[in-house]
Amino acid sequence: MNFWEYLADRRELLAFETWQHASMVFQCVLAALVIGLLLGVAVHRRPRFAGLATSTAGVIFTIPALALLGLLITPFGLGVAPSVVALTLYSLLPILRNTIVGLNGVDPTLVDAARGIGMGRGAVLMRIELPLAWPVILTGVRVATQLAMGIGAIAAYVSGPGLGEQIFSGLARLGGANAINMTLAGTLGVIVLALLFDGCYLLIGRLTTSRGIRA
């Protein structure tokens, strides 16, 4: 059967795997965003701790995906757990680094002025620093999502959910019936999801960033 016939014949399975892939990536990036924001806020005024945090995340980032997934099999077994842990760890570096850079890039005079009118540290953070740093943080989230989208396909190596199953199954059956169709369906599905997510982030950026900052 040709590619379009393959898509039509397996549309329910492909839709389910696409949903699994998108859900896994979204949840892992969200978890990395929470962790990255908390760490970034905690260490951005302490250069030594900021360097330690980004270096640790960077070391994790340099571990090859297949190697990290293989290492996570021992404590977590096969399936969703090692996939989620790996994607969250890989998503952490760009978010953490951009959080620190964004917060450090806020004009100190604005912070001093806010404190001068009686704002506490928490209010300054929530109303001044984070809104001004948000475009840089969101850029980190976009990068993390694209990374997680691709690495999420490799999660099929440890029986993880998503479109990676199509890719790995197709590669394992090269020369057989529908092998190319399976690989192509999984690959194109990941690409389409990556573009959709990035489009959503562009829209979120426009809706959540004040016009003055965008200008």
Image (cartoon, rainbow, N blue to C red):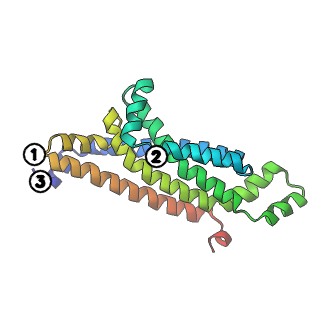
- Distance of label 3 from label 2 (alpha carbons): 39 Å
Distance of label 1 from label 3 (alpha carbons): 15 Å
Give the residue at x 57% y 57%.
Answer: 138
Q: Which residue type does callout 2 highlight?
A: Thr
Q: Residues within 10 Å of mark 3 (few under 14, many from 20)?
A: few
Q: Is residue 197 above or below residue 156?
A: below
User: Going from the N terminus, do you reach mark 1 or mark 3 first?
Assistant: 3
Q: Position of residue 161 (x, y in %)?
A: 35, 37
Which circle's residue, 3 or 2, is located before the other in the chain? 3
Q: Image quarter for residue 9?
A: top left
Which residue, given by chain and number where applicable, does mark 1 sit on? Answer: 175
Q: Amino acid at mark 1?
A: Gly
Residue 106, compared with residue 123, is above or below; it is: below
Q: Quadrant of the C terminus?
A: bottom right
* Quadrant position of residue 134: bottom right
The answer to whether any part of residue 163 appears in the image is yes
Label 3: which secondary element = loop
Instruction: Give the amino acid type for the residue marked by disc 3 in the picture.
Output: Asn
Residue to which mark 2 is pinned:
62
Tag in front: 1 or 3: 1
> Disc 3 marks which residue?
2
Marks 1/2: CA distance? 34 Å
